[in-house]
Amino acid sequence: MKKSLILLMSLLLIGCSAEQEPVKEQSRYNNQTLDAGFDTVISLIAYADDESQFNEYFDLVRSEFKRYNALFDKYNDYEGVNNIKTINDNAGIQPVKVDDDILEMLELSKQFSELSNNKFDITMGPVLEIWHEYREADISLNTEGQDAPVPSMEELQQAKACVGWNNVEINEAESTVYLNQACASLDVGSVAKGFTAEKVAQELEARGLTSGILNAGGNVRVIGSKPDGSAWNAGIQVPDLNGINGTLGVLPLSGKQSLVTSGDYQRYYLSNGELMHHIIDPDTLFPARHSRALSVVTDNSGVADICSTLLYTMDYQEANEMIEKIRDLGYSLSVVWVYNSDDEIPEGKKEFKYLDYIIVTSDDIEDIFTVSK
């Protein structure tokens, strides 16, 4: 009995001693790169024990974004890599053996295609390629002060005949993807960057990072909270066509939350005074026209990327019906809509005003969204 009591007291003393050891204070570091792919700036803010540890985190970010960029690139070949371009180049020819990350990204995309009745659809490659070619040529015309044409509906409908998941054969056992029609192609621009940000953030967490924020050209993924326990503040960009920097407002993010925005103010050209942006509605085959911008917050950056595009192609009522379906899958999902002041705004909703914009949020974040001053 006495030995047991002595042992118990010794364990308690050891436990108390361990609890009283001082916790090493971490410092804030940040860095960014333009050469990690995805045609954007990749930045990391993180709290680390020292600069050497932070540099290890940042080196991981840079190398992993480069690796995923090579996998998801539809325009360039990389030695020893079978990527999205390889799949497209072999359409109607043969299956392509691919990395597991490509298979996982395709399965996630297919899940949301089925959920949305193909309102989100990465097999829209043939249609999106037409718009890409027009946009690249017409931006130059706009720069020269000239008006620019748009694709004909006949041209777009012909391309749409090559769209559909029935053209995609995924063999998980063999790790292959085969496009069974020569005219089919994949475009993963609406999911690849967010999917990558999530994967990289998970790797950072596995390496020990507990407080940080990863930003991939506006695709924001936080890790934990700030060391004092407060949330990170993520800004929502002003949808200004002239590239004016600024934020409409901010949302607090913590844990594993991501914020992703889709809007009409990037990658666009003008035709007869009308904005022709890059987010194409699969139903109309033309740019979506419901709001200026839409931001989503959820606990998976890949899902956030998908949802920002998907919900942007829907009107307010359709979007809310889809939000409930996505929540039923187990995802948290909060949404911010940005409208021009003369747009038709959803009735009965609390409105936030910033300059000439009206902001509406989903009910769950009305009380935590803060408008910029």
Image (cartoon, rainbow, N blue to C red):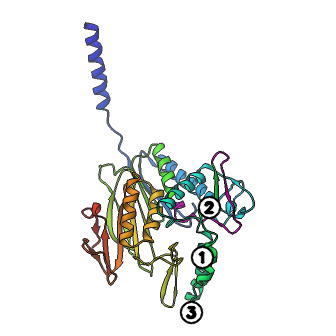
In the image, 90: left or right of 99? Answer: right
Task: Give the Cα distance between marks 3 and 2.
Answer: 41 Å
Label 2: few (<14), some (14–19) or many (≥20) C-alpha neighbours in 10 Å: few
Residue for point 46% across, 66% down:
310
Answer whether residue 191 is magenta in the image: yes
Q: Which stretch appears magenta? A: 172-193
Residue type at tag 3: Gln
Give whichever of 181, 368 is nearer the camera: 181
For marks 3 and 2, the one nearer the N-term is 3
Residue for point 64% across, 77% down:
158
Residue for point 54% across, 76% down:
285
Residue 63 higher or lower than 147, as above or below: above
In the image, 92: left or right of 344? Answer: right
Label 3: few (<14), some (14–19) or many (≥20) C-alpha neighbours in 10 Å: some
Residue for point 57% across, 60% down:
36
Q: Secondary structure at mark 3?
A: loop
Residue 132 is labelled as 1
Where residue 20 appears, x then y in whole percent? Answer: 28, 32
Tell me the residue that label 2 is attached to. 166
Tell me the residue that label 3 is attached to. 146
Where residue 351 appears, x then y in whole percent? Answer: 26, 73
Residue 72 higher or lower than 163, as above or below: above
Where residue 141 appears, x then y in whole percent? Answer: 59, 88
